[in-house]
Image (cartoon, coloured by chain):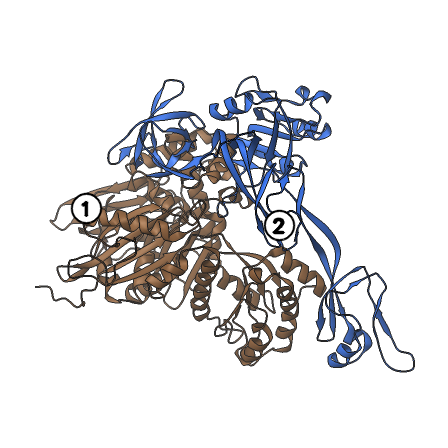
């Protein structure tokens, strides 16, 4: 008999996205927390509503219809706590990614030290760096002031000085910030985060407190030259982002009140969950979470002793879509297309889609373009995020993606695939994982919501993850090898729990699968050729085989090589993409 | 499901808030009648600043410098005005390098705004001022036809409307623009090249109302000093029939092309307004409407992008689309007689 470790509180979790708002109910079923149901409605941060609470009420109303019980009263307010008649909910947590990209100015001393930490800190939320001021800035103070005024920042992040280190130069850098803030209209004065030399924090409060719309002080991100600790500042920044959203968008303050302050930026909540998973389940390999949504691409990675969180609004699939062309070319996007699409058609698509970010692909050609764009956006996000991964991580080659297990993937753009195989191929192409890893699709985008509930109820996330609320795509085996197309590189035999066996021969340039259902496990015996490496060294495999778990696609062998080099001949490349898609059950 | 409404209406009440981006002076009063080009508010703003470190220049402490500074906040000073004099037998002095306004004095420094220019806010539509927003602008009401667009180059102007689009998918070329078009607002279809935009600027025209523009021309379009409004989008898209019909039947009328940029958060959208005389009160327009059979809708994505049709039925549950995705969808009869199935999120109501 299962013993319940929980006190039975039901939790409603709401995610306010740029395009959609989702309300998700977690409750105790047979003594353990489960994901019960979800309701979705279009987000209402934008005109004509300009009030996120409307979309939240609509999403909760849709959830009510699924659950068959009332969560909202006659005046559409949340019923809390649960009532004896079964209506209502005990607690609410909220995550939010809706809202315009936050404009941030960075202030720090050295480009490669404090300013780099400030960059990493700022990239952990939905912000774009619009101006940077450092010691090496050769501009006159008035030019810096004009630069800040032109940048129209919502947020200023100040770093610099190790604890007990430089203080005069940090204070000197604050002069243009103070003057610019002084002459800005009150409603446009930015919030300030100081995450530098702790010894001068009090002075900073006196200096900056008088002109900032809100001053937050966090522990130093660079307590010493060799040490970087972003976590406390990220927590502070998350609070600030919610406060900025309260200023920018109506209804966020109401959600803050309903949730008793349990409201977090979605990316931060995702990061919290990845950090937790890395602590609980982490082994030699890292844990990777990717989320491609309308507001941003979010890459979060948990390693043994380090955690990274990178948010890239410029790679989001929403209104910033056209901005993607500042980072890539139409040709590079089209290399992922299985159809013959011209650059002009793709350019029109990007501009048209950015006019209507919440629309979906209704035709085959639209879907192919949408997925090609998503691939390139996620690829670029991953390449950028890799800069911040720790140097000493498990990898087959330092130039390739490190070894991760598992890889969790979610977000609107990934659910814009009709079959799990399409999503998997998108992930294999853009992330280019290596070795042996399980791939899990967060189809209901639960990960950030679990991260938000963790502060309220630490048991809930563990039990929901173990309950199978996520879709396991299966285990992916990717050998790193240099070989000619068509050369055999791997031979594998999968022994099922019932003793049956299935075999596969993998040739360079191809993808193969072996069936293994969700919930089943098997033992994989692998023979490697041409010095192929799946994470145990060139040509080496564990003597007693590799335990693998099943999923929608079973065990997938990706023999296309790393880094993935697609054929330059467009016709051949498109044929291969079609073949790979077909192998993974797509069309 | 609720869907946004794309306004293409022959006669309605139009209420528009016109605001300065910064604080300034409102020049109109309540119930005043205004014309499109009337300036209703103005503000001064400085493009640059000059920071004078008096303490450093005079070689004195900040507190002493503060006592030596002769100007105060809000003083408007001419270039070369002496603002601080040091002490001693041969005292040094500090003068303003440029004409400007003092914005901060303290800490031994003076910060001045220089290069000031005047920002003028025009009414944008002819109508009646129904509300004053102190220091920022006014709310203006008028009645007339309204055609919303999907993209604008940020300009605004008005003039008589002439039609160079024989059909909704006509392509406008530079050769079509001759001197007889000078000072008019031109209704046209698709623009594919920069020469056409330049030819319109050379005349100059008072505005271009286009169905679509090639995306590579966006930078040039933004540089044009006349308004450019797109009714349907980017690439070779014909004008939707409702907009084409309404605009092409209002030729030789005075129209305002407010090609302001789309702002999802404020709700501002590019639009064409054709003021019309009316004697009765008109109902306000809805911004959202529940999708239901009989409603006129416009396709925002393929298939049939830009086309208008009417909803035959909302399909129950989820429908598998041509793309393979599953979504809530509707069966729609297009104006060409064809029937298609489109996801509800791709529709907007026309009206």
Asked whether residue A401 appears in the rendered view, the answer is no
Q: Quick one: label 1, few (<14), some, or many (20+) residues within 10 Å?
A: some
Q: Residue at x 45, y 45 (%)?
A: A47
In the image, residue B163 above or below residue A581: above
Outermost residue to the left: A1
* Quadrant containing the C terminus of chain A in the rendered view: top left
Outermost residue to the front: B279
Chain on which label 1 sits: A
Between disc 1 and disc 2, the foreground one is: 2
Asked whether residue A13 appears in the rendered view, the answer is yes
Give whichever of A272, B90 is nearer the camera: B90
Q: Which chain did the renderer colour brown?
A: A
Determine which of the numbered discs, if any, sits on residue B20 in the image.
2
Give whichever of A404, A453 is nearer the camera: A453
Which element type, helix, strand or loop, lies under badge 1? loop
Q: Position of residue A483 (x, y in %)?
A: 40, 43
Q: Which chain did the renderer colour blue?
A: B
Residue that badge 1 annotates: A517
Which element type, helix, strand or loop, lies under badge 2? loop
Q: Position of residue B245 (x, y in %)?
A: 50, 22
Res A513 quadrant in image: top left
Chain on which label 2 sits: B
Give whichever of B101, A438 is nearer the camera: B101
From the viewer's perspective, tell me whether residue B262 is left or right of residue A304. Answer: right
């Amino acid at each position: 008999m299962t013993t319940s470790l929980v006190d039975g509180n039901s939790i409603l979790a709401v995610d306010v996205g740029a395009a959609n708002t989702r309300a998700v109910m977690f409750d105790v079923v047979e003594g353990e927390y489960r994901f019960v149901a979800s309701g979705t409605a279009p987000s209402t941060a934008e005109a004509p509503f300009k009030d996120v609470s409307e979309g939240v009420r609509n999403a909760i109303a849709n959830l009510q219809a699924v659950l068959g019980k009332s969560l909202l009263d006659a005046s559409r307010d949340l019923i809390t706590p649960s009532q004896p008649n079964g209506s209502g909910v005990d607690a609410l947590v909220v995550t939010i990614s809706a809202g315009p990209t936050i404009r941030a100015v960075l202030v720090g001393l050295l480009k490669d030290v404090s300013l780099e930490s400030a960059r990493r800190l700022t990239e952990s939320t939905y912000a774009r760096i619009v101006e940077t001021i450092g010691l090496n800035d050769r501009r006159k103070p008035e030019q810096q002031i004009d630069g800040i005024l032109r940048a129209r920042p919502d947020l200023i992040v100040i770093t610099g000085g190790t604890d007990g280190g430089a203080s005069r130069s940090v204070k000197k850098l604050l002069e243009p910030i103070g003057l610019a803030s002084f002459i800005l209209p009150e409603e446009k004065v930015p919030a300030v985060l100081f995450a530098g030399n702790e010894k001068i924090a009090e002075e900073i409060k006196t200096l900056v407190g008088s002109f900032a719309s809100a001053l937050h002080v966090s522990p130093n991100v660079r307590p010493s030259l060799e040490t970087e600790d972003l976590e406390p500042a990220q927590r502070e920044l998350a609070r600030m982002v919610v406060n900025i959203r309260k200023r920018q968008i109506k209804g966020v303050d109401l959600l803050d009140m309903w949730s008793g302050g349990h409201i977090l930026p979605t990316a931060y909540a995702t990061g919290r969950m990845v950090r937790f998973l890395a602590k609980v389940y982490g082994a030699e390999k890292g844990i990777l979470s990717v989320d491609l949504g309308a507001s941003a691409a979010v890459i979060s990675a948990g390693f043994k002793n380090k955690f990274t969180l990178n948010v890239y609004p410029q790679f989001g699939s929403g209104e910033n879509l056209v901005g993607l062309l500042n980072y890539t070319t139409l040709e590079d996007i089209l290399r992922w297309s299985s159809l013959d699409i011209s650059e002009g058609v793709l350019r029109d698509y990007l501009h048209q889609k950015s006019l209507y970010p919440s629309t979906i692909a209704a035709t085959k050609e639209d879907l192919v373009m949408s997925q090609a764009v998503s691939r390139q956006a996620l690829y670029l996000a991953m390449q950028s995020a890799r800069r911040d991964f720790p140097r000493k991580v498990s990898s087959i080659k330092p130039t390739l993606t490190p070894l991760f297990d598992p890889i969790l993937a979610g977000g609107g753009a990934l659910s814009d695939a009709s079959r799990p195989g399409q999503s998997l191929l998108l992930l294999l192409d853009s992330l280019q994982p290596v070795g042996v890893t399980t791939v899990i699709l967060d189809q209901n985008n639960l990960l950030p919501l679990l991260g938000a509930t963790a502060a309220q109820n630490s048991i809930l996330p563990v039990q929901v993850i173990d309950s199978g609320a996520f879709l396991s795509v299966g285990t992916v085996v990717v050998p790193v090898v240099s070989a000619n197309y068509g050369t055999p590189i791997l031979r594998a035999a999968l022994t099922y729990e019932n003793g049956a066996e299935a075999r596969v021969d993998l040739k360079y340039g191809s993808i193969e699968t072996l069936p293994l259902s969700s919930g089943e496990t098997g033992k994989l015996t692998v023979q490697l050729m041409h010095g192929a490496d799946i994470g145990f060294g060139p040509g080496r495999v564990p003597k007693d085989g590799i335990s693998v778990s099943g999923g929608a696609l079973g065990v997938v062998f990706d023999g296309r090589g790393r880094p993935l080099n697609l054929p330059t001949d467009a016709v051949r490349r498109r044929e291969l993409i079609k073949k790979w898609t077909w192998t993974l059950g797509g069309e | 499901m609720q869907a946004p409404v794309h306004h293409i209406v022959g006669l309605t009440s139009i209420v528009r808030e016109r605001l300065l981006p910064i604080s300034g002076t409102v020049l109109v009063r309540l119930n005043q009648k205004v014309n499109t080009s009337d300036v209703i508010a103005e503000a001064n703003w400085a493009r640059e600043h000059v920071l004078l470190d008096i303490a450093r220049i005079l070689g004195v402490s900040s507190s002493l410098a503060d006592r030596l500074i002769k100007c105060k906040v809000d003083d408007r000073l001419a270039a070369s005005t002496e603002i601080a004099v040091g002490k001693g037998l041969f005292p040094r002095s500090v003068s303003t390098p440029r004409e400007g306004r003092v914005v901060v004095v303290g800490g031994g420094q003076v910060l001045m705004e220089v290069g000031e220019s005047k920002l003028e806010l025009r009414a944008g539509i002819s109508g009646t001022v129904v509300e004053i927003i102190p220091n920022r602008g006014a709310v203006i009401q008028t009645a007339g036809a309204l055609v919303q667009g999907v993209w604008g180059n940020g300009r605004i102007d008005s003039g008589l409307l002439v039609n160079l689009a024989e059909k909704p998918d006509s392509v406008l070329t530079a050769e079509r623009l001759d001197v007889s078009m000078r000072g008019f607002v031109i209704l046209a279809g698709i623009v594919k090249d920069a020469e056409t935009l330049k030819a319109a600027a050379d005349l100059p025209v008072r505005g271009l109302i286009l169905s679509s523009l090639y995306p590579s021309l966006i930078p040039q379009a933004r540089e044009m000093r006349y308004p450019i409004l797109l009714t349907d989008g980017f690439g070779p898209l014909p004008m939707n029939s409702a907009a084409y019909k309404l605009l092409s039947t209002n030729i030789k009328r005075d129209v305002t092309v407010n090609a302001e940029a789309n702002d999802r958060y404020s709700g501002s959208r590019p639009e064409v307004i054709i003021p019309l005389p009316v004697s009765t009160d008109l109902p306000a327009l809805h911004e959202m409407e529940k999708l239901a059979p009989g409603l006129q809708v416009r396709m925002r994505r393929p298939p049939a992008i830009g086309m208008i049709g009417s909803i035959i039925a909302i399909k129950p549950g989820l429908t598998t689309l041509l793309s393979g995705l599953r979504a809530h969808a509707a069966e729609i009869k297009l104006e060409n007689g064809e029937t298609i199935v489109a996801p509800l999120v791709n529709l907007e109501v026309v009206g």
